[in-house]
Image (spheres, grey):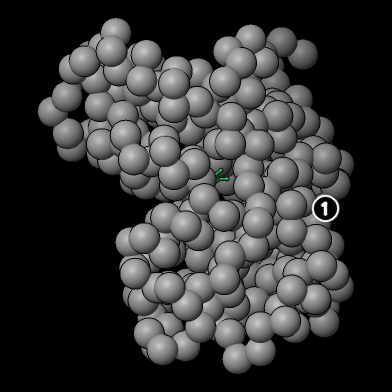
Amino acid sequence: MDKQQLIEAIDNLRREKNAVILAHYYTVPEVQEIADFIGDSLALSEMAAETEADIIVFAGVHFMAETAKVLSPGKKVLIPDPEAGCSLAESCPAERFAEFKARYPGHTVVSYVNTTVDVKAHTDICCTSSNAVKVIESIPADRPVIFAPDRNLGNYLRSLTGRENMVIWDGACHVHEEFSLERILQLKAAHPEAKVLAHPECKAPVLLVADFIGSTAALLKFTEEDDADTYIVVTESGILHQMQKANPSKTFIPAPPIDSTCGCNDCVYMKMVTLQKIHDCLLREAPEVEIEETVRQAAYGSIRRMLDLK
Ligand code: 13P
Ligand code: SF4
């Protein structure tokens, strides 16, 4: 099948099977183009909780599809490539996390959604990069907090909220760790008019030179409302597709990682999702995300409490 036939076949299958395709901004442009809904992690989980479709195809990474299944256990949740993991989620194995948690009794556990369902089962409330401050501020100031698994987001939250009573798991995302302050400063020197936009998973020195810090959806919104012409974008390169689409006359420069030949401002996992795999999983109704019911129930509360925090 050529690309056009593949797109038509996907359209037919999703109509016949009452399926919805949810895609994250980091997927390749052609996947974003066929999605029913594109969003950041928060918007995608809200969508997964609300959709009336019978089947959810999650064009993203495994923890996102798992979150959809936790929220909608009665639906079939398909993941085009089950190998599409997340280095940040992997940096926090559930058994080690349970031991870590046991060392800090009385702490409220806040986990970024970029965790496995087993870590969520040990969590009081989840957050994403777009609601993390709100989640932290919902916890009484005198109650100590465990934040997992992203140390960069955790340190950023500590500086924003002034919460000294926060212990942070030492995890990170391989994409955001690779951005180099030196290369960003070189780009700023070459484009003095450009604004720097960064995701809070970036390291502290990078965040210090950013004009705006936010989730993928917040960064995109900023480019739509701001009046600059040029932006240096310090996050996974997939977001540039929607930025350019929304602002055809503006210039977006992807920030280079330390080694600009490594291609590591691409998330290898997000890039595993292809049109062919979306087609095949819809056709076969597999691979399907399955979660043991006791684990699902244990994880559910942490995600629900996040979504209920208005
Ligand atoms: P957002 O919640 O900003 O979409 O981020 C998801 C993610 O995986 C960042 O690396
Ligand atoms: Fe995980 Fe990083 Fe990829 Fe986001 S960009 S899905 S945090 S590996």
Q: Which residue is mark 1?
A: 288
Q: Quadrant of the N terminus?
A: top right
59 or 102, which is in the foreground? 102
- Is residue 19 in sight in this rendering? no
Which residue is located at x 36 percent, y 60 percent? 159
User: Residue 305: x, y in percent?
Assistant: 51, 79
50 or 69, which is in the foreground? 69
> Against 202, is 31 above or below?
above
- Could you say which quadrant of the image residue 227 lies in? top left
- Is residue 262 in sight in this rendering? yes
User: Residue 253: x, y in percent?
Assistant: 38, 16
> Against 146, is 51 above or below?
above
- Could you say which quadrant of the image residue 183 lies in? top left
Mark 1 surroundings: few (<14), some (14-19) or many (≥20) residues within 10 A: many
Q: Secondary structure at mark 1?
A: loop
Which residue is located at x 85 percent, y 70 percent? 95
Horizontal arrangement in the rendering, residue 228 relative to residue 26 (left or right): left
Which residue is located at x 85 percent, y 47 percent? 287
User: Residue 157: x, y in percent?
Assistant: 41, 61
User: Residue 52: x, y in percent?
Assistant: 56, 62
